Amino acid sequence: MSDWRLLITRALPGADTQACELRRLGYHAAVLPLVAIEPLAETPEQQAQLSQLGTYRALLVVSQPAARLLLARLAATGRRPPAEPVFAVGAGTAAVLQEQGIDALWPASGEDSEALLAMPALHARLARSAGRVLIVRGQGGREVLAKGLHSHGASVDYLELYRRACPALEGAALLQRIQAERLNALVVSSGQGFEHLRAVAAEHWPALARLALFVPSERVAGLAKAAGARHVFVCAGAGTAALAERLAVSAAP
């Protein structure tokens, strides 16, 4: 058993899945979601986008919640998924799509916007013609991805299916959970997840800032360090494989 004792803070059901995978690898992993996924009501514009998926040059799905909600929308209305492979930000997102028979491609290395933009298959798709690209996501985010797509001559539409809410949780309860299970590391899966951690911790943040913090990108690491986090470990994405790879080469306190 590893000396790392982790608190997984991403939204359900991904948090439970990641914790189970980490336990199989020999890590103690507790779950306390600090991000709640709230589906958004479907708008007429979104209905039009879903009915015209086949007209987009490429469809990019940038999170597991986005993949699940896209599948639910398609199933509820009897619409067909796109014929060409969908581009997913990582293996976890691709797996959600593949479980429902949708062909999905994802970066061989990395699970972020930069890795997605570097995919040769995406370059080849965009090279056929400029066309429109649809990014399936939650509210906000992925501006780097949109900017990169624009540089390839593509126009970008967004299909926003959910918002990320901060659950009602007291900072004292968060700290007590960490102390009770002798946890020595926190795991966040996004910039917004880190902001929720800060918001929940409130006056207890200085105590939590002394713990190891595993983050999915340099951008989130910058947010954490600016807020006073002392021991920040950058993973190559938010997936379990990226986290496990970083844990394996990082000494536990």
Image: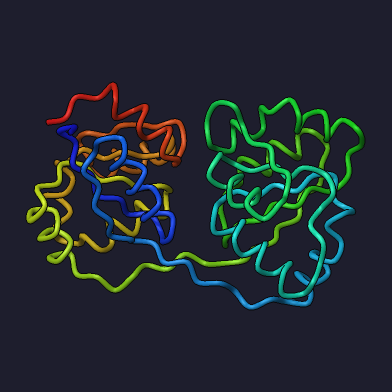
Q: Residue at x 40, y 41 (%)?
A: 220
Residue, far top: 249
Judge by depth and name the residue closer to the eye, 198 or 243.
243
In this view, 242 is above or below 164:
above
In this view, 149 is above or below 199:
above
Q: Position of residue 216 (x, y in %)?
A: 42, 38
Q: Residue at x 67, y 62 (%)?
A: 71
Query: Could you tell me how many numbered marks the image carries?
Result: 0
Colour scheme of this structure image?
rainbow
Q: Position of residue 129 (x, y in %)?
A: 92, 36
Quadrant where the C terminus lies?
top left
Judge by depth and name the residue closer to the eye, 33 or 202.
33
In this view, 50 is above or below 132:
below
Q: Residue at x 27, y 60 (%)?
A: 32
Quadrant where the N terminus lies?
top left
- Give the image quarter of residue 196: bottom left
Q: Where is residue 19 in the image (x, y as percent from the top left)?
A: 32, 48
- Give the image quarter of residue 33: bottom left
Q: In this view, does 40 lie to the left or right of 32?
A: right
Q: Residue at x 59, y 52 (%)?
A: 96
In this view, 41 is above or below 182:
below
Q: In this view, does 33 lie to the left or right of 164?
A: left
- Give the image quarter of residue 16: bottom left
Q: Where is residue 233 in the image (x, y as percent from the top left)?
A: 30, 32
